[in-house]
């Protein structure tokens, strides 16, 4: 493990524990990335053995992000994005899918902080080191880049399963959306308990030392969008949200886009 404080281009980073599996690095491994360590790969493989579809979920989630951001930028006229729990930079990040838009990424992982410097070359793209349990901090820091008097897309992309209490999830989302103006959008997806295999995969992840991930029903996820107007096709498997091909891969992950009127 890397112990103590690490200096990175003038920034002081907290301990980078490479001997303990971390969610962002495990997800990076499933997506075929290289920013992960043996502990992350061991935890990831434990899940793959019982739920091999997890790699497809990682890939399909990126496709969902790309389609959603393109829709918001091209059709909904959104030019500001608040991406909460962004994870490690991979291919086709939000600011790359919507070039010229103002984008604020939020994550609490020190490894993400280390990589974020690559995104800070443009004043319209900013990284906030914070936890989604700190909405006031996120909103305050995001306001340095985003104009909340104009529509904003607030995005929670497969991250809220780390919060075990659904009411806390709803409260966080509601607080973030309360700061936005009409015309803003909420984008939210998460893993669902829709097959026995994915439930067993989540169990293996926790047993291998990863942070437990709470799988919820689609009907539970629907409550996160209370008070907002769903964009067609509504809450659906992320692979089926305005797919580029009529051939849709089934996946245990549901998501939606909704508008604040």
Image (tube, rainbow, N blue to C red):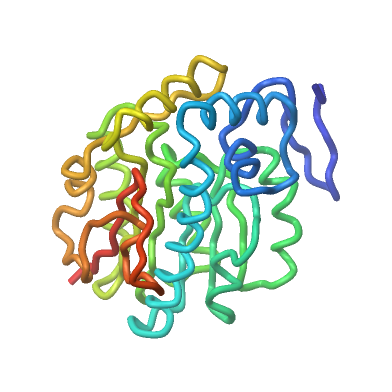
Q: Residue at x 50, y 47 (%)?
A: 85
Q: Which part of the image, by quadrant, shows the N terminus?
A: top right
Indicate the position of residue 90 as horizontal and vertical percent values. Answer: 65, 57
Residue lying farthest to the front in this orientation: 247
Asked where in the image residue 45 lies, by quadrant, the reply is: top right
* Farthest top residue in view: 207
Q: Is residue 41 left or right of residue 233?
A: right
At x 66%, y 48%, the residue is 32
Indicate left or right for 6 with 74 as reference: right
Residue 247's x, y, as percent?
36, 66
Q: Nearer the viewer, residue 45 or 67?
A: 45
Residue 87's place in the image compared with 13, above or below, is below
- Judge whether 193 appears above or below 258 on screen: above
- Residue 6: x, y in percent? 83, 34
Give residue 245's position: percent from left, percent from top.
Answer: 39, 73
In which image quadrant can residue 70 be found?
A: bottom left
Q: Quadrant of the C terminus?
A: bottom left
């Amino acid at each position: 493990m890397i112990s103590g404080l690490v200096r990175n281009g003038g920034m002081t980073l907290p301990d980078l524990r490479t001997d303990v599996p971390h969610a962002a690095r495990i997800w990076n491994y499933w997506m075929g990335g290289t920013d992960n360590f043996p502990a992350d790969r061991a935890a990831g493989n434990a899940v793959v053995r019982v739920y091999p579809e997890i790699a497809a979920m990682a890939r399909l989630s990126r496709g969902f992000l790309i389609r959603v951001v393109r829709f918001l930028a091209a059709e909904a006229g959104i030019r500001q994005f608040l991406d909460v729990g962004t994870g490690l930079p991979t291919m086709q990040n939000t600011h790359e899918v919507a070039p010229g838009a103002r984008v604020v990424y939020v994550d609490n992982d020190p490894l993400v902080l280390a990589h974020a410097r690559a995104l800070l070359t443009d004043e319209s793209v900013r990284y906030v080191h914070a936890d989604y349990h700190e909405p006031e901090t996120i909103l305050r820091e995001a306001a340095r880049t985003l104009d909340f008097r104009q529509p904003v897309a607030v995005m929670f992309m497969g991250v809220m399963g780390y919060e075990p209490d659904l009411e806390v999830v709803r409260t966080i989302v509601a607080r973030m959306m309360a700061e936005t103006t009409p015309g803003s959008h909420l984008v939210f997806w998460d893993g669902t308990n829709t097959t026995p295999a994915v439930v067993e995969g989540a169990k293996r992840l926790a047993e291998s030392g990863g942070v437990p991930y709470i799988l919820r029903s689609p009907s539970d996820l629907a409550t996160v969008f209370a008070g907002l107007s769903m964009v067609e096709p509504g809450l659906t498997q992320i692979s089926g949200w305005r797919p580029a091909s009529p051939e849709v891969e089934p996946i245990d992950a549901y998501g939606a886009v909704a508008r604040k009127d």
